[in-house]
Every structure is written in structure tokens, then in C-alpha cells.
Amino acid sequence: MSVITISRGTFSGGKLLAERLSATLGYRCIDRDAIVNSAAVRGVSQKELVAALEKPPANSVATLNHRKYIYLAVVQAALAQEILSGRAIYHGHAGHLLLSGGISVLRLRVIAPIEFRIRMAQERLGLSRSETVAYIQKADADRRRWTQYLYGVDWEDPSLYDLVLNLEHFGIETATRLVAGMIKEAGSDFLEEHPSAIGDFALASRVRGKLALKPLTSHLEVEVQSRSGAVTIKNTPFDDQEEVRNCVMGVPGVTALTYEEAAPAP
């Protein structure tokens, strides 16, 4: 199993790197739009999904908007399904955080000098220099606040990534050769994953997404774990357990269900 996630600021070259790596390694290249389209099929509109992924809260100390929980649960389920067979590259919002949970992911971050980003943005958007700078600054600030709000981490923290690539002194082709060479040098041991690990993660994500969309369980915010078809759900009130069971046991691949109390906050 091999999955690569690429995090980047707006117009930092992350999409170009993903496409070059896809061609070089033979990995599938998956972007946010593909995930949004897949997730939308499951019952949430594309417009609402994009809004949930792009618009951070006005106040970082506000209570987590439950609607965002629903959208992110659905998006995670869609992304987990897309990378189920491995050999995939995902470039989009916080892919390394959406896929956190026990599976092996090579987490890349791409950064670039502001002039590089301005040039790319102007070519794409046709804005003036001042408008382009404002656009980039706002997009970066929104992503930073969004990540902090949902995951409690700093989007730019290098410890969240396995490799940070700065494109200031070398281009996309060099960065591609660097990453591809690193994977080749590591050989078959690089990011190898037992098939059951990603299968368990994908099943748990499907269950969480299904619970988030079903009207009788959509008010819940639960933690879901899976092991060889046996699903464990934490933080389920007793009064909701019957409805949860009816929903979960209908998800293909689920063979058993148990409940577990969530650990108390430290």
C-alpha cells in the first residue's frame, strides 16, 4: 500500500508536483474536486462540501459546527475509498490529516517564494499584482485557520510532514526526481502496508460517514474503529445505540458491532 499526500499553499506548485509524480511513479492522481464529486454522490451538495472545506469559522474558539463534522466525515469516507487500492497521490486540503488513523502515508509539503506564486496565480486568474497578493494571503490565512479549528494544529508546522520541499532553488522536475528517487531507494519496504490496514480504515470511515448522513443518527459525533469487519464505536449514548446498530450493520463489510465509552478528557 502506498499513498502520498501533498499539502501546499495556493499556487505553490503542489498540483504540478502531484501530476509529475503521478506520471513518473504510475500512481493515481486524486484532487479535491474528485473527492468532493464522490462525496456529493453520498448525499451532500458539492456547493456545501466546498464551503465546509474552504471556509473557516469566524471565531476560532467557537463550538465546532456540527454541519462541518458531517461534511468532513463524508469527505474522509470518500477519500478513504479512493485510496483503498493504494498507489495514489492526493493533493488537497489537509489530506494527511484526513487520512490519519493508523495507515502509512508519505506526507509532503510544498512551499514556494511569493514571486513564484504570484506569477502562477496571475497566469491562471488574470488579476492585478495587488489583487493576486491579496488573494494568496487570504487563501493561506483561511487554510491556516481552518486546520487549526478542525484539528488543533498549525498548518505550517513542519513536524506534520515527512518532507518539506522548497521550490525556491529548484523546479518541479527536480522535486519530482528527488521524491521518486527517495521512493526507489527505499525499495519495496517503502510505505508497504498490510491490505487489512487500509481496508479497516476505509470501513471505519464508511461507517462514520453513513452515521453522519442518516437522519436518526446525524446528530451524533462518534469515533469509529474497525478490525477485520468488527466495528467499535465510541461516544454513543445508550438511547441511540439501537438506531446506530441498525445503520452500522447495514454497511457492507461490517460483521460485528460493539460500543465503547470514550476516554475521559485529560
Image (spheres, grey):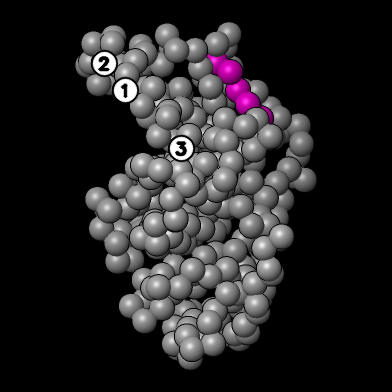
Report the residue marked by disc 2: 131
Residue 90's spot in the image, x, y percent? 49, 43
Query: Vertically, is 16 above or below 214?
Result: above
Who's the residue at 64% across and 57% down the image?
101
* Residue 27 visible at all: no
> Of the numbered discs in the image, which one, if any, rests on residue 135?
1
Alpha-carbon neighbours of circle 3 within 10 Å: few (<14), some, or many (≥20)? many
Q: Which residue carries the number 3 mark? A: 145
- Side of 27 where 116 appears, left or right: left
At a point 39% along the width and 57% down the height, the residue shown is 65
As helix, strand or loop, the secondary structure at mark 2 comes to helix
**Mark 1 residue element:** helix
Is disc 2 in contact with disc 1, using a CB cutoff of under 8 Å? Answer: yes
Quarter holding the C terminus? Answer: bottom right
How far across and how far down the image is residue 115, in percent? 42, 9
Q: Is residue 200 visible?
A: yes
Left or right position of 70 against 126: right
Tell me the CA gap for discs 2 and 3. Answer: 21 Å
Q: Which residues are magenta?
A: 163-167
The answer to whether the residue labelled 3 contacts the one labelled 1, judged by CB atoms less than 8 Å apart, is: no
Residue at point 73%, 43% (across, down) = 190
- Which residue type does callout 2 highlight? Glu
Q: Amino acid at mark 3?
A: Arg
- Picture residue at 43% right of the left edge, 50% below the top: 62
What type is the residue that disc 1 sits on?
Tyr
Q: Alpha-carbon neighbours of circle 2 within 10 Å: few (<14), some, or many (≥20)?
A: some
- Of mark 3 and mark 1, the one earlier in the sequence is 1
What is the distance, in whole Å, between disc 3 and disc 1 at their CAs?
Answer: 16 Å
- In whole angstroms, how far apart are the C-alphas of marks 2 and 1? 6 Å
